[in-house]
Every structure is written in structure tokens, then in C-alpha cells.
Amino acid sequence: MSGNQKEFGQIKVLVVEDDQHTTLLIKRMLLDLGVVNIFEANGGPEALRLLESLEGQDLVNVVLCDWKMPDMSGLDVLKQIRTRDPDMPFLMITGVADVDSVIEAKAYSVTGYIKKPFSMEILRKKLRIVQRILDARANSAP
Amino acid sequence: MKTASVVHSSLISGFGRVTGDWALRDLLFSLLLAVLFALLAMGGVILEAFDVIDTKRIEIWRNAYNGVILVLAIGSVGVAYQRWCYNRKEIERRTAAEEDRDSLRKQLTQVQKMKAIGELAGGIAHDFNNLLMVIDGFGRRASANLDNRAIQEECLNQILSAGERGAALTRQLLVFSRRQVMEKRVVTVGRLIEGVQGLLGHTLPEQFEIRFDIEDPSHKIETDPNEFIQAILNLVINARDAMTNSGRIVISTKEVGTDGDAPDWIRFDIRDTGHGIDKATMQRIFEPFFTTKGRDQGTGLGLAMVYGFVQGNGGRIEVSSALGEGTDFSLYFPASTNTPVQFVKTGEVELRGKGETILLVEDNEALLNLVKVQLEELGYNVMSASGAFWALEIDEDYEGSIDLLLTDVIMPGMSGIELVNAMAESRPDMKAIFMSGYTDEAKKTGNLPEGASFLQKPVKFNHLATVLREKIEENTQCRKAC
């Protein structure tokens, strides 16, 4: 656990998911991986409101977002987030995605995908890559 | 622009000088009044002391004297007040006039800027539409004649040729906008002139005489030799077009200014005996897409490219011309004292890959597919990723060695430079080549690393093959982003 805490100490996650059970599962997995800074939003509109209220506080540095949600799709959440933060790592959680949607998400600079169902190992790998991106960015900052 | 700034500074200094003169004049005026009062007062005392004034009439004198002083004092105060009011009004008037002039100047600059952007956009649209028409037309013709090999060959050649013309056009635009990555190196004047001579043979018909007057071939400058030769070639072509049937072009070099043993600047002059340039044309010669040649003869980018190139080298350019006598373009480059590098004979490199593994990262899907196919054709084992995240996923998953990372520079979320640095720890022996058509972002994030290999898009197949082989066969191992 302590190793994980060190590995993902800088990761601050916002989980956007309309299904309460899935949210709970992802939160548990993140906590097991040593991520302690976790916010959750029950859908796109709530996620955007939350990000707006947290703006400038550096409390979220990666978004894990479900693709299919009733009020607002993951793609729409991505589009909205990109208007205010073009570099925020954004991982789309997908069950089945059609090719056009994937291409559109790429056009809005989706950082990567996590395919459902995913294991702890998969999530660890994705977070490790996000961590490397954040580290590289921090090292190249003037 | 230079003229405008000169006008501006002279107006400001002139305005300052005028207000300064007024202040001095008013001070002198006040001093004069003070001296006058002092003299009058002293005069009265002296006259009384030496009994020049009849004592019987002294009261009358004193009253008259005081009356004169009072009138003079009131008059002086009135005049001084009037001067002060006048000065204040004049300052306000001139400030307002200066503000009006400034506002007009800004509006004029804005209008000129919009006009230049309009012409630029129009020029680009025109030239690219022509190219797109050729590509589209011949593409359709080829697809309608799939069974006719001769027609297909002709169409493909036309499409390839249009692609090359498009690449040349963007290259010129990038040099003009100074966003082209120049492969600068220290080169001697002699070496540069050799390169120019090699190309001029194909450009100038026999009736035109060309002379070289090189002061010292060992002088050195730091530049991209290919871009330098292209710039000189552009000037020579213009010189040739300015001469109708015959004439002479002189290319000369000269050191200008000295700091110790080494010169400060090296000047390259390209003089012709052509028809010269009139005043109106002279003011616009460096504008992109401004041309005095026919639409099919010149793009109007040649001199714009030369201007951008010289500026990009920290140099300057001067033009002098006399109608009917000829034109002289003087290009000034900062002299270098560093040691010239040796040119690599790329022709000796075996171009095919030997099964090395390349990780290709490019966010443009079409380009990614094209380069992937090219690399595979060259005999490399290719893994491709359409962004930094996917590249890092491959880095995490792939257990074999990756010999080389070929990456785009500007990508959303993470730049190519950051990607190379992020992989430096996990792949310490991996070499890297950057490719881009535009490097402002790279410059913002701390420049391309020292010694980094760089491919300018669009990349020609042979050039890609050559640079890859050279990089892979380099002896040095790069630990971080080189």
C-alpha cells in the first residue's frame, strides 16, 4: 500500500459515472491503488459544476469518465472540459464505442480509453501512464 | 515599418523640445522682470541718497515712482498669467493633436495589416486551389481509368508533382513566417558560394554574365546552407528577370565592421544591371504574394522568403536601386568564429532497415498510416501510436527493445519532447527523431534538445530513409531526448 501511495501520490481523480455501484467500485479500486484524492460526480452536469467550483485550486488532475450516461454523454463532458482546460488528462471508460465516436473523441484530444470491465492491473497501468505524463509536464515547466 | 517608427520618435522629441523652450522663455521673462524691479528700486534709493531729487518734491516723486512700479507689477503679472494660459492651451492642443495622429497611425497600421492578411490568405487560397484542382482532377481521371496503366502513370506523376509544388509553397511560407526549422551550422563563405555556383549553371542562360567577387572565402557564418542557397537563387532569378536580353549579375562578399581579429558582419551583395525598381514597388517588394511578374511566372513569395530567412539568421537586408541602372540587394549575416562542421555524405548510407523496431507517434491518423507503411517498406518493425498516451501504453506493454522513437512534436496533452523525456528512463538506449512542420510550441517548452534530429514535414521518402539510417547507426547513445 505504501508503495502505491508513493506511486500515485500526485494523482487527483474525478470519477464521472451515473451508476452508483460502478462509482463505488472504481473508488474502492482507486483507494486500493493508493489514490486518496477522489471526487465523484453523478453525471456530466454535476461534473462540470464541480470542476467549475474547484477551478484554480489544483484539486483534480485527471478525469475518469463513463462514455454512456443519460443526461450528458462522456463525449459532451470531454468537449466542455476541453474549452476550459485543453491539457487535463481525460480517460474515457467505454463498454462498446462506435468508430465515429472514437474519432470524434480523438478530435477533442481524449487522453486514452479504459475498456469495461477492467481489472485493478489495467487501472494501475493507466494511472501510471497519467502519472508519467504529469511528471514529464512538471519537469518541462519553466 | 522602420520609417513609421522614425517618424514617431521625431514627433515625440520635437514636442518635448517645444515645451522645453517655452519653460525656458518664461523663466527668462520672470528673471528680467525681477531685475527691472530691482534696478528701479535701487534707482530710487540712489537718487534720494545723492540729493538729485528736490526734497520738496520728494513726496510727489515717491508717489509717482510707486505708482509706476505698481502698474508695471500688475502688467507683468497679467502678461505672465497670459503666457501661462497660452502655454497650457498650446500643450493641450499639441497633446490632442499627437493623440489624434497616434490614433490615425494605429488605424492605418490596422488597415495595412488587414490588407496584408487578406492578400496573404487570397494568395494561399489561389495557389492551393490550383494544386487541389490538379490533384482532384487527375485523381478522378486515374480512378476512372483503372484498366489503363499509361493514363494511371500520367495521373500519378501529375499528382506527385502537385504535391511537391505544394510542399515547396508551404516551405517558402514557413521561411517567411520564420517558423521553418533551420538546420543551422557554421559554414565558410567559400563553401556557400560553391553551392550557389553549382545551382546557377542551371538557372542562367548564356547571354547573362555572372561574376563572383569573394573577399575572403574563409569567412564563416552560421546558417542553413540549403536555405541560404535558395535565398541567393531567388535573388538571382529576380535579377535575371529584371534584365531583358542580356546583362551582368555580380555576387560579392565583404566583411563589415571588425571586433578584434574577426569581422562583425559578412555582407553578401547581389547586383544586377537590370531595369531597377521604382519607389512604389520598392515599398512592397517584401510583402508576401506581391509580384510584378505575371500570375503564372511568380508566386510573390521569393523576396518574402529571403526577408524571413535573413531575419531568422539575425541579419538584415538593404536594397538600393536606380531606374535603368540596376538593383543591389545587400544581405548582412553575423560573422561566426566557431569551427565549420563537415558535411555528411548521405549517399554512402545504406538506406534500408535491418529489422530494427521503431515506435512511430503521430496524432494525424492519415499521416500515421502513411509513414507506417513507408517504414515497413524500408524493412523496419513498426509499432504505431496516435498520441503520447498510447505510446506510453506500448512502452509499458512491449518487452522487447525499441531502437528508435519517431515522433511528432506538437500533440495534444503531451508534446513529443516531453514524451521522449518520459521514456528516457524506461528506454535509455532508444534514439529519437522529431518531425513537425512547425516548432513554436517546441520552442515554448524549452526548445528541441541539443543535437536532436529533426524532419521537416512534408518528409520525402528518401530523406526519411536517410535520416533514419544515420540516426540508427550513430555511435552515441542518447540518454535524453537527442
Image (cartoon, rainbow, N blue to C red):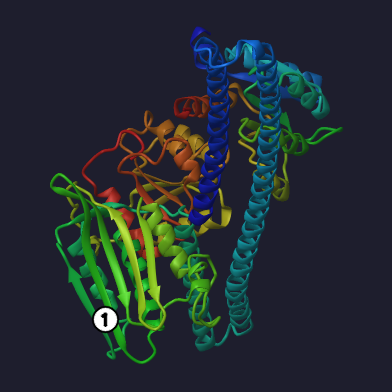
| Residue B102, percent from left and from top | 64, 47
Q: Residue furthest top?
A: A2
| Disc 1: which residue | B201
Q: Is residue B407 left or right of residue B481?
A: right
Percent coordinates x, y for residue B75 in the rendering: 70, 28
As drawn, A60 above or below B378? above
Give the chain letter at badge 1. Answer: B
User: Can residue B344 be seen from the camera position used here?
Assistant: no
Image point (32%, 90%), residue name: B246
Q: Residues within 10 Å of mark 1 (few under 14, many from 20)?
A: few
Q: The C terminus of chain B is located in which quarter?
A: top left
For badge 1, the amino acid type reads Gly
In front of the other: B255 or A97 = B255
- Locate residue B255, reporting x and y percent: 21, 58
Q: Can residue B278 be seen at all in this image of the molecule? A: yes
Residue at 33%, 62% in the rendered image: B331
x then y, percent, for residue B470: 27, 53
B393 horizontally vs B339: left or right: right
Quick one: which residue is furthest to the right in this view? A71
Front residue of B455 and B250: B250
- B51 on left or right of B214: right
